[in-house]
Image (spheres, rainbow, N blue to C red):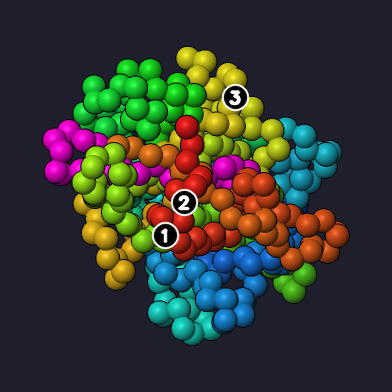
Amino acid sequence: MNILRNTLRALLPAAALLLWTGCSADDEAAVPGGGGEGETVTVPLTLDLARTWTTGDDEAPESRDVPNPPALNVDGWAETEGTDRVRIVTFRRRSTDAAVGGDGSTNTAPFLYDPSNDYTWEVQKEGDGKGADDRFYAVGSITKRYGFEYRVVGIAYSSTRTLSPSNGLLPDGEAGLFSLNLADGLTYDSFMATLTEKNPDEWEAFWGSNLDYTPNDPTQVKHDGSNLWTRGHYDGRLVYTPQLFYGYCHADGSDDPIIKYADFDPEEGKYVTNTPLTGTLYRAMAKIEMHLKPRDRNFGTNVLPDWENLQGAFLMANNVRIRTALTDYDDFLPQTDNAQYTSDMQDDGRNSTDSEKKYTVIASHVERMKDADEYTLTLTAYVLPTKTKLALRVMYINYAILQNQHNYNYAIDVADLSSAEAATGVISPDVQDGVFYLRRNHKYVFYGDLNDMTDNEID
């Protein structure tokens, strides 16, 4: 009897354990999402960079990376090659999906920044751009938690790009050219990027080193603000824009930007949690390339020929956006109202009136340039898509006369052009009445001679 009693005592706890285990298994099986509170799953994520430049209407998603006719010579492999980093930024919210324990109601809660899924990955390259399968891409993983759903975006940039000279205001690389407003509690709808602004007030190549020379000469820039260009045409900003690529992530096989903890797999007949994630990042900026013959000039101010050598050139724009939302690729369409994207450096009132005449430095080339047919001055800038006028500021020095330095400002204008008519019947002008319509993932290339610009001088 004692043996039987002791045996029963040993078996009862084991039976209770089996009963408890069986109930737990039954409870988990009742959860379609295949998980429980606090459980996590790590899923792979692959992002590709769409490198091809758009040549037509960029409103339709299918046109963002369509192959272009080879004769246009606008493949973007060379520009994309320097892009070597992808920033992954994740937002999450409690799910109402019944598959993961929710009540099945419509979810209107905001997505909040998830710092546990914030990463920077290296961009990898396959091929040299000549093969159909050659690509730039980044791979990694994020962690999903049971009971939550996610929005994930990628932002690609270059950590090594050599920038235009900035008088030491900016180091090379694009990481310092923009900042993200990430903070605990940030909502997805408030996610933004702000471009870095610098003030080149002490840059002698821009303002001129002989500040007291010919004070009544209207072409001579005065650093003290007495000249019309300083007060009327220049807003005190230098903004070098990164070539950002932007896109959202989604479950493989779906375009839904909301990533669930579990997705129903019809082939397996059940919910799965490890569906790989993917996405494509599209070039978000417009690119400006200016190729000019840097001619010496004879200004004819003396009896003898007064030849002056070109020392510097500065590309300017009068409507430079410095902020953009990061919630959708359409945030990178040109804005009709730039009020919310204005500069923090404009509080002194310089841009309160007559703003169309105020210019920002967006690229520069500073070195003594020879007057030679084989030499070409190249200025390159990326900008947030916008409608803007463009100008060129150049600095000449006459070495025969000490402290004889002149700075001239030329408007950049070409004949009115427009893109092909869009499916909606609306024509989007590229330039009209001297105003350039700069669109995302479009490249604008100028060729000319400095002598051709002398009739477009700005006071």
Residue 244 numbered tag: none
Which amino acid, by three-letter code, is at mark 3? Asp
Q: Is residue 310 left or right of residue 427?
A: left
Q: Nearer the viewer, residue 426 or 365?
A: 365
Q: Could you classify mark 2 by the number of other residues whose Cα lies within 10 Å: few (under 14), some (14-19), or many (20 or more)?
A: some
Question: Does the image show residue 263?
Answer: no
Secondary element under disc 1, as helix, strand or loop, is strand
Whether residues under marks 2 and 1 lie with C-beta atoms below 8 angstroms apart, the answer is yes
Q: Nearer the viewer, residue 323 or 427?
A: 427
Report the residue marked by disc 2. 453
Lower position in the chain sequence, tag 1 or tag 3: 3
Q: Nearer the viewer, residue 359 or 375?
A: 375
Tell me what residue is drawn at x 49 percent, y 47 percent. 455
Q: Which residues are magenta?
A: 382-405
Q: Position of residue 337 (x, y in %)?
A: 69, 33
Q: Nearer the viewer, residue 386 or 318?
A: 318
